[in-house]
Image: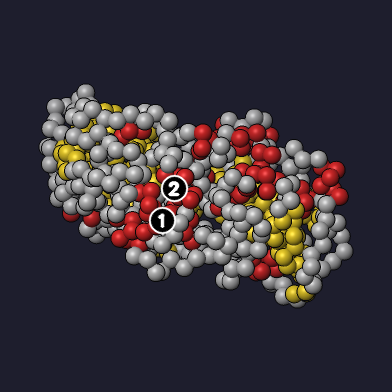
Amino acid sequence: MPNLKWWMLVFIAATMAQAVVAEVTPNEPGHDVEYELNVRVPMRDGTSLSADIFRPKADGRFPVLLTRTPYTKNKGSANSYARQGRYWASRGYVFMVQDVRGRGDSDGRFYPLINEATDGFDSQQWAGAQPWSSGKVGTLGGSYLGWTQVYAAPLRSPHLAAMVPTVTPPDPNRNFPTASGVYMPAALLWLAGLDGRINQDLDGPDINAALSSSPLVTMDRRIGRDLQVWRDWVAHPANDEYWQRQSYQDRLLDVDTPMLHVSGWYDDVLVGTTENFINMTTRARTPQAKARQRMLIGPWGHAVNAGQKLGAIDFGPQAVIDFDGLQARWFDRWLKQIDNGVDREAPVRVFVMGRNQWVDENEWPIARTRYTRYYLRSGGNANGREGDGVLSTRAPGSEKPDRFQADPANPVPYLTALNWHQVGGPDDFSEIELRRDLLVYTGPVVDEPVRICGPLRVKLFAASSARDTDWTAKILDVHPSGFAQRLNDGVVRARFRNGPDQERLLTPGKVEEYEIDAWSTCVELQKGHRLRLEIASSAFGKFDVNPNTGGPIGTETQRAIAQQTVYHDRLRASYLLLPVVSPRP
């Protein structure tokens, strides 16, 4: 840990003149605001990072809110950092936004994640030691800005007093950019957008053509970029030392800082929020750490609280909350010691889709959950939504398996824009379900509302003619109109069926048991709705396509059609495990 006395002596004055902003948002404390731009903040290795700092124009010391971004602090929008700076400074906080190493006005070279722990710690130390600082630092921000918080926290700066990590991904080999050898094309586009010091325009290349061709490792060059990080990622499909050096989730267990974890049911990195909350409330090292965790999940995508409508689904007026006010209460409690009761409120607050209202819970997953098996059943013809596949709570007996052909040259499409801003949503997959190369199992019409709120898991017994293949599972809410609303989905790459660090190819034709983690959802199926499960071997747009050859991941250029068989009989009962929850008394 750095010498704290040395850090107390460090202060590099800003070279930019101070300016005063008189604007104060209504109903907030009446501080005028002053700011300093391009303040140079020294790191332990001598690298200088750039920060813009917004402060109350008043005497005294104030708590600091730090956000660190790779997207450059000079973004212009209704939610710009200047707006955030004015909001927080007018409330009696110092707001500090910093370009991470190698991005924007900061020196050094950007390589995702590897410097965020030490640079974040050093920045917290610097902020806590300034003459305008009360010595207490809070952190906030979403996506990579959430990563910058959770990577730095285990270094335990004495100034760090509260965190709001929002839409924070898990360890990078758990979801983004890869999940056990299955790569997200969005990760490549994300890297391309951050190539160099400023944000890049990706409108030129034919993205669809680039993502559709092979090999995976040279996909960056097909969009006109030379991205060493992408090639490093693809060179490490297993959970090896490369990824373990970049992990944070186990280290986070040593942190006792109060954290408000925030995400949306359609956030494409939702699993980071739920896993971090579960880990911290059940495995953290101290009782104090366990008690100081809170989680909020709304009906949102990766952009939190962006509106009451996502895609074609309107979640009602309760979908939009006063998120600034929520964060302000959190920071007021932990950075200003205001006894506002936030630490005595329910640890979990989630939005129940379908019913379209918020509910409070005491834990996650919810303790009163009835985990119910919905078995895959058919007469051997579950191909597409016009087939005979059903979901039933009655276990199968002697039944024919279902079969389909998986052609990597014609993968099952995933309904998402080919960019990294949002991967999928509450989209209607009913047209996709007309294809014969996916299996569809539909439950009975619901007679009264059924609340499904918690983790989604699929147990699959299946065989393939290939040496390697993928199995995908998608859970949907089918409306009376036929609209098949995606709830969530997951994938497993067959060679990693026994774990992310155990790469074993298949014996063609041999039945294997697979566990597919489809993350979580919270929905109340309304009267007249039905539950549906799709099983396929591709979801192009969200996941890279398995060539089905068993060749090396990343460099394989050949493709093979795989003959797939899914079993659902007495000895090999495939099922969807549903978290059925009764409303709280």
Q: Which residue is mark 1?
A: 220
Foreground of the two, 223 or 358 = 223
Let me know if residue 207 appears in the view. Answer: yes
Q: Residues within 10 Å of mark 2 (few under 14, many from 20)?
A: some
Element class at badge 2 = helix
Foreground of the two, 435 or 345 = 435
Give residue 153's position: percent from left, percent from top.
66, 42
Q: In the rendered view, would you say 19 is above or below 540? A: below
Give residue 531's position: percent from left, percent from top.
28, 46
Give residue 50's position: percent from left, percent from top.
70, 60
Foreground of the two, 55 or 577 = 55
Name which residue lies at 65% across and 69% down.
Answer: 83
Name which residue lies at 61% across and 37% down.
Answer: 252
Q: Residues within 10 Å of mark 1 (few under 14, many from 20)?
A: many
Name which residue lies at 45% across and 56% down.
Answer: 226
How many badges with numbers are in the image?
2
Element class at badge 1 = helix
Pointers 2 and 1 in contact (CB under 8 A)? yes
Q: In the rendered view, would you say 22 is above or below 155? A: below
Q: Residue furthest bottom?
A: 22
Q: Amino acid at mark 1?
A: Asp
Q: Amino acid at mark 2?
A: Arg
Q: Which residue is mark 2?
A: 231
Which badge, 2 or 1, comes first in the chain's sequence?
1
